[in-house]
Image (cartoon, rainbow, N blue to C red):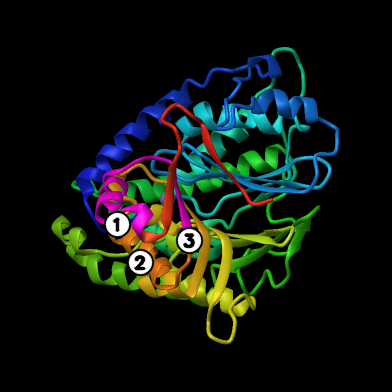
Amino acid sequence: MAFRGNVVEAGRAAGEEQQCSEEREFHEEREFTTEDTVCTEEEDGRCSFLSAGRERGRPVGAMFKLHAVQAKWGDCLLVEYGTGRSQFLLVDGGFLSTYRGPLWKVLNARVVPAGGRLERVILSHVDADHIRGLLGLFEELNTPRRDGAPPFLSVGGLWHNPYGVTLDPEGSLERRLKRLAALPAMHNVAILEFLQSIEDGKELQRLAAELNIPRNGDGYDPLTVEMATGAVSFDNLRLTVVGPTEANLGMLRAEWEAWLDQYEAALLRGDLGMLDNTDGSPTNQSSICLVVEADGCRMLLTGDGRSDFLTEGLLARGFLDAAGRAHFDLCKLPHHGSNANITPEFFRAVTADRYVISANGTHGNPDYDTLVWLVEAAREQNREVEIICTNETNSTRTLVVSHPPDRNGYSIRILEPDADSIEVALA
Ligand SMILES: [Zn+2]
């Protein structure tokens, strides 16, 4: 979420999600059985649900895959890893509608037949397009089943940096924002959404506590570059936190205080137009960013972070060489491919073979500029890259015309409109 930009667009987006919030109010208990699951046909024609069921409990070899779930303009990523059997991490849950639709089907098709455990659920940050699906999941797990059976999934732990810990330890920013939001003339969708995100974060923590899911229980809390100094391992997987840094968080906090200092008086006078000139997001840049490694391959998962902050984290954790470069097998572009969160220089220095973009054109994401920077940086360096998108957008359509893939050394793969996820296999 960003405060800058088009409030009308944000309003439309908020309206769609509002429907989901109302649905949540009337949450209806659902029963989960493997018979309910929908068989998802993969590109190779294999029925993943049936094959996963056949493989249950049998060695399936080392694996390392990313499943980008259809999350509209949000993020929802399932990491599959393991030796001998598939294991899973869920990184962000998209919207509530993501959970109730594609994510629910993917969890039942892939995770349930493999033992029904998410080793960790990781929330990059509290914005609605990342947290709401996780709230849906945790609410479902917390709802007793009519048949008395245990929940359809177990969760080994939650990685989540509460807003109050990372950005607002004294609660002063929240208090000031609430004061603004209470003004009769206040209709700023972004501020209201932001306050809702803070509440959503608290709700996720409450549900996790009720479910006895430990938060940040792997020896590091909060999960920042300074605190999480070592990698955390699960089977063949290693997770290293490369964002946020304490310095980034301190800067964001200072920016927010300066923003409030500058605009509070004007807003209290009713000069709401000044909000249009604001920039930055209070939470995006606090995203937990991760290097996920297995079997000699590595993914860079960036939440809605910012590439310059990310570079600092990669440097601090020793991922950059002497020339300031790093290479990954896969990079999930930050902030749905927004050009506000990445630079051409980043694409030259931190390179990848595959770029995953979770976006559907809302807020203009992915930006055409971002796609051009990506393709041109790879072409300059004679690197063949694959771009994997959860949706076709105006920018992807424009890119393939302005920079034809066969003449520019890249390929593009887009999740089928009726599919729930797109698989990127690294091992
Ligand atoms: Zn987002």
Amino acid type shown at disc 2 = Glu
| Magenta stretch: includes residue 338 | no
Q: Residue 297 location, x and y as percent?
A: 67, 60
Q: Position of residue 167 (x, y in %)?
A: 49, 65
Mark 3 highlights which residue? 384
Question: In the drawing, what numbered circle is on residue 334?
Answer: none
Between residues 139 and 418, which one lies in front from this camera angle?
A: 418
Magenta stretch: give its range.
384-407
CA gap between label 2 and label 3 equals: 11 Å
The crowd level at tag 2 (other Cα within 10 Å; few <14, some 14-19, many 20+) is many
Per the model, the C-alpha gap separating discs 3 and 1 is 14 Å
Task: Please tell me which residue is depicted at 34% across the width and 58% down the height of the picture.
Answer: 407
- The numbered mark, 2 or 3, whose residue comes first in the sequence reads 2
In the image, residue 22 sits, relative to residue 76, either above or below, namely above
Q: Is residue 205 left or right of residue 337?
A: right
Residue for point 70% across, 23% down: 50
Which sits earlier in the primary sequence, circle 1 or circle 2?
2
Mark nearer the N terminus (3 vs 1): 3
Q: Residue furthest front?
A: 407
Q: Position of residue 206 (x, y in %)?
A: 62, 42
**Marks 2 and 3: CB-CB under 8 Å?**
no
Q: Nearer the viewer, mark 2 or mark 3?
A: 3
- Check disc 3 and give the amino acid type: Glu
